[in-house]
Image: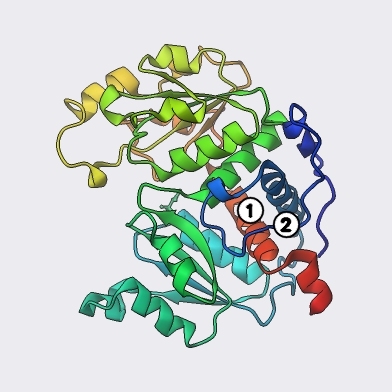
């Protein structure tokens, strides 16, 4: 498989407003810990590579030998449906050997630490570890002590970089670009790693980002990242190209952040009436899992503007791109 030099969607338009930089051909860092570490050119490289990977999904035989002989460990300390399964599908499509560690039946329940667990798995010579963990910074910790390449599949309230990459991929497929589009992100902003990764990515690529939620669920000082903040849903969604809803994360809340779920839906829930304020070709996104009737009405989640299941499908191509590029991309294939 060779890296695509440009995407069918004319991806480099996202960088039009920036001084000319040579296109990236490889990732500088050996791990993917967060969007914070990626340059705009590296983000475009991942999205372009994902376009090439997407083609594999349409072939009768959806498997290429690119990562044959490589071993990837999926180490998920928190529940996951989409991220874990799409990493596994991505690894299998690239012919990597995949090892899924079931935390509930591992020695973690006997008190083994994250580092000891990882080092013991490393004794079996994996090449990469895909880690989801409840603690912010867990991936950075493993990157310091492990020989394997670490991919962040969501760490606490910090980052979820592959989610933001698949979101950007989905937006670019619909809008043809990221620069200059209005993206409204609404919901529980305070507890969301998806929010942090998306804000970093979208602002790096020149999107206009609006954030909306109750004052109790907006991180202090988030404006410093170059976003607009409002507590009025209509202001956030008016003329938006993209509406991205975020889950109310009750499991991370200690105390009352709003009076009731019904009240939250009445004031901040995404309804068809509110969607009608956005641009006629708006797309509705949600990383999942959704709380129907809390942050989003079912008519919107299942409606004609929703690309929520498309996001899930795109997650496979984007994660294939990340695995491929971290393995060395075209250089790895030459050496093989
Ligand atoms: N979007 C996301 O991270 O979903 P999962 O928790 O199901 O992986």
Task: Name above or below for residue 12 compared with residue 289.
Answer: above
Residue 171 seen in render: yes
| Above or below, comparing residue 41 to residue 298 in the picture | below
Seen in the image, is 253 located left or right of residue 311? left
Query: Marks 2 and 1, how far apart in space?
Result: 8 Å
Left or right, residue 297 beside residue 49: left
Disc 2 and disc 1 in contact, CB within 8 angstroms = yes
Residue 312, image x, y percentages: 54, 48
Residue 273 visible, this angle: no
Q: Residue at x 48, y 56 (%)?
A: 83
From the viewer's side, name the closer residue of 6 and 136. Answer: 136
Q: Residue at x 34, y 72 (%)?
A: 114
Mark 2 surroundings within 10 Å by alpha-carbon count, few (fewer than 14), some (14 through 19), many (20 or more): many
Find residue 86 and report its image quarter.
bottom right
Q: Describe residue 276's horizontal placement relative to residue 310 as left or right.
A: left
Residue drawn at (36%, 74%), measured in percent from left and top?
115
- The residue sitting at 51% across, 57% down in the picture is 33
Q: For mark 2, what is the residue? A: 53
Q: Earlier in the sequence, mark 2 or mark 1?
A: 2
The residue labelled by disc 1 is: 318
Q: Quadrant of the N terminus?
A: bottom right
Quarter occupied by residue 29:
bottom right
| The label number, if any, that marks residue 336 in the structure image | none
Label 2 within 8 A of ligand 1 by Cβ: no
């Amino acid at each position: 498989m060779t890296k695509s030099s440009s995407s069918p969607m004319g991806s480099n338009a996202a960088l039009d407003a920036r001084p000319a930089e040579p296109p990236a051909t490889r990732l500088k860092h050996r791990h993917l810990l967060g969007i914070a570490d990626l340059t705009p050119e590296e983000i475009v490289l991942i999205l372009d590579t994902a376009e090439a990977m997407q083609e594999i999904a349409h072939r009768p035989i959806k498997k290429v030998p690119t990562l044959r002989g490589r071993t990837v460990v999926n180490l998920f300390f928190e529940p996951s449906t989409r991220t874990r399964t799409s990493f596994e599908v991505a690894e299998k499509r690239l012919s990597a050997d995949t090892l899924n560690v079931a935390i509930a039946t591992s020695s973690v329940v006997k008190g083994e630490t994250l580092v000891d667990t990882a080092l013991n798995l490393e004794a079996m010579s994996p090449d990469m570890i895909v880690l989801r963990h409840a603690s912010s910074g867990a991936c950075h910790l493993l990157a310091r002590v492990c020989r394997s390449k670490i991919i962040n599949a969501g760490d606490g309230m910090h980052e979820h970089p592959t989610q933001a990459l698949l979101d950007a991929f989905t937006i670019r497929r619909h809008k043809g670009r990221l620069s200059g589009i209005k993206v409204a992100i609404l919901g529980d902003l305070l507890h969301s790693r998806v929010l942090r990764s998306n804000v970093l990515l979208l602002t790096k690529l020149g999107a206009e980002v609006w954030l909306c939620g109750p004052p109790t669920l907006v991180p202090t000082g988030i404006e410093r990242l170059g976003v607009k903040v409002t507590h009025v849903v209509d202001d956030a969604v008016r003329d938006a190209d993209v509406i991205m809803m975020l889950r109310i994360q009750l499991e991370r809340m200690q105390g009352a952040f709003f009076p009731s779920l019904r009240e939250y839906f009445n004031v901040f829930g995404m309804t068809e009436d509110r969607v009608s304020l956005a641009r006629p070709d708006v797309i509705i996104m949600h990383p999942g899992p959704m709380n129907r009737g809390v942050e989003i009405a079912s008519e919107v989640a299942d409606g004609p503007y929703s690309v929520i299941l498309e996001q899930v499908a795109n997650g496979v191509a984007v994660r294939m791109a990340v695995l491929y590029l971290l393995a060395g991309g075209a250089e790895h294939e030459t050496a093989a």
